[in-house]
Image: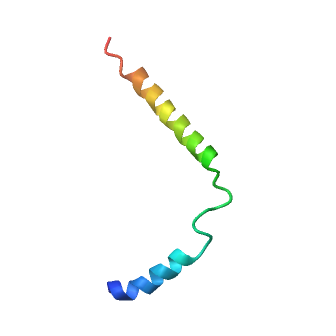
Amino acid sequence: MSTAAALPVLNLLASEGEGGNHDSLNPYLTGGGALFILLLLLYVTTRFNRDR
């Protein structure tokens, strides 16, 4: 499939939906979950990185 043939298909796929916003994706919940996971990884990393 050439690039010229793929462009109409990609435009069709990109235009469907409501701009990519899904009702179940709460930005505060997503950001809070990501922050929690990063803090957990930081904690685990610092616990295993004891030199003495």
Depth check, front residue: 26 or 1: 26
Left or right: residue 52 versus residue 20 is: left
Left or right: residue 52 versus residue 17 is: left
Q: Quadrant of the N terminus?
A: bottom left
Residue 50 in the image: x percent, y percent? Answer: 36, 17
Residue 13 in the image: x percent, y percent? Answer: 52, 77
Residue 21, quarter of the rendered image: bottom right
Q: From this viewpoint, which residue is outermost toward the right?
A: 23
Name which residue lies at 33% across and 83% down.
3
Q: Which scheme is used to colour this image of the protein? A: rainbow
Name which residue lies at 45% across and 86% down.
8
Depth check, front residue: 47 or 25: 25
Q: Quadrant of the C terminus?
A: top left
Residue 1 visible to an observer of this rendering: no
Is the residue 19 above or below the residue 35 in the image? below
Name which residue lies at 67% across and 56% down.
24
Number of callouts in the render?
A: 0
Residue 38 in the image: x percent, y percent? Answer: 48, 36
Is the residue 34 above or below the residue 4 in the image? above
Q: From this viewpoint, which residue is outermost toward the front?
A: 19
Name which residue lies at 58% across and 41% down.
33
Left or right: residue 46 versus residue 19 is: left
